[in-house]
Image: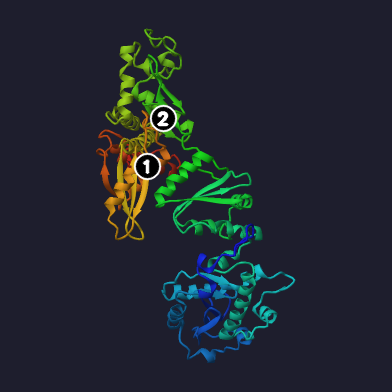
Amino acid sequence: MSVPGVPEQLRFDELDTPLRDTTFVVVDLETTGARPGEDAITEIGAVKIRGGEVIAEMATLVDPGRSIPPHIVEITGITTAMVIDAPRIERVLPAFLEFARGAVLVAHNAPFDTGFLKAAASATDTPWPKFTVLCTVKLARRVLSRDEAPSVKLSSLARLFDVGTTPTHRALDDARATVDVLHALIARVGNQGVHSLTELVDYLPDVSSHQRAKRTLASHLPHAPGVYLFRGPSDEVLYVGTATDLRRRVRNYFTGSETRGRMKEMVALTTRIDHVECAHALEAGVRELRLLAAHTPPYNRRSKYPKRGWWITLTVEAFPRLSVVRTPTADSLGPFRSRSTAVDVADVLAEYCILRTCTSRIPKGREHGPQCPPRELGGCPASVHDRATEDAYRPGPALFRQFLRGLDDAPLQRMRARVEELAAGELFENAARLRDRTAEVVLALRRMQRLAALTALDQLVAARPAATGGWEFAVIRSGRLASAGCARRGIHPMPVVDALVLTAETVVPDATPLRGASPEEAGLLARWLDQEDTRIVSASSGWCEPARGAGSWSEWCALARAGSASTRDAETRPPVPGSADHRLGWRS
């Protein structure tokens, strides 16, 4: 019976693999020394257990291929004569790996034993499986106080727990003793709420009892994809995250697998966990972005301000110029994460679209130029090219608009020609600087045109095969996820699609380049659509990018970025004219 306000212990069916259903193989080795790879194994003993019962045992001497040192003989009692007829490790190791397959590997001081086994596997070209490894030394140090167990040697723990087998420095005896120690330690942690393998592994790091006790906050979460919200004492949202399995992911915050200090602090403040169950991971990702924007939770580091990018836009005046702003207009390029990057790109575009860079306001009917610095002192591009009147100036803004829409790539052609001209004149640093600026322009324009092509579609319905069978569907309208759902295996998909379209959110776009869509949401949708197994079910119109857009410059941009990396690797060493370094990134 549930008592309000009293935490409930989770049932086994709510956890990961219960400890009673977990198979452990407890192993112990005897060796010729303490150095894996240099010393060799002389004996292997292993005990397989599940549910507290011994299933099987394995024990064998191993011929190390060398004599056993006297001090090792004194400790273990294993002599060179005893192992001379024993099998070599190349015969024993495959048998042991088959014996331990699918089990959790346990050893007392596990790094020692696994180090020798891995070294033997490497020496014999035997693949080493990805075992989950549990060290009873670490577990004992975590469970027992120093007063109770000043030493965690196997012999000391065997006396402490009064085990049935006395360690003798022989592999099978020590493995049996370790089994009893393991059972005693598991009994201790069971009283602290550790009932599954995952919890036992996570228990090893230092986790406060207060943090572990709060895992009951996740008891109502489903094993389904979705978004979770940690709420604080005043019901404020502290953190938003997404998961393919809500319960499993959220429970990790209350175990040793969570090592981030900020997250431990957040968990300490948490009083409640809300969730939004989603049809699939894409819907969860979109809802996460929207909730981040709505709540700006203090413990999230990214995506809290999806509309705070910088945009390059044309001003509205008689002689328009480029301005860096927060809010885009119909003639804008962006978004950029930093204002400095946006300013650099704006300066390059102003130069090659022939737009003024002076900031004085020019009334209609007046001329541009008298207030600009002389041409010899670096006047703005409009002055350099004698664009004094409104009629003479008009081609510059028109070219910028055509450039944004992918109808004219003349500015990029001019930039490339100038890079080649500087390189031919052996002005390599200037050429590399302009090459990198040009690549920045291409990347920014490509990103915007790619997203604009998606947001231009009034409706797009797409599908992907679900991992569990059936189909995942997304109804996208003007770059926003308007509806999401799944058709399970064996269910005809088209009625599901029709229902999703009928119930999809109504989207009212605006006149900005992305029609009001969040760049992060549109980017997430575009990446989902770009996956190989995604299929288009229907679209309101053709989905395409402009023929003269930045997409056609992708190869050149890749070469330019490679050239930039080569330049940095060479520590700004000037390339030799005619060499590969000289040409790299400077020709399409």
SS assignment at label 2: helix
What amino acid is found at the position of numbered circle 1 in the picture? Answer: Ala
In this rendered view, identify the residue nearer to me: 456 or 331.
Answer: 456
Residue 280 as seen in the image, left or right of residue 198? left
Instruction: List the single residue furthest toward the top.
Output: 365
* Labelled disc at residue 345: 2
Q: Nearer the viewer, residue 404 or 553?
A: 404
Of the 4 image quadrants, the one containing the C terminus is top left
| As drawn, 359 above or below 71 | above
Q: Residue furthest right?
A: 147
Between marks 2 and 1 in the image, the one whose residue lies nearer the viewer: 1
Q: Which residue is mark 1?
A: 482
Considering the numbered disc 1 on the image, is that residue within a helix, a strand or a loop? strand
Q: Residue at left 26%, top 47%?
A: 537
| Left-right relation of 131 to 473 | right
Q: Residues within 10 Å of mark 1 (few under 14, many from 20)?
A: many
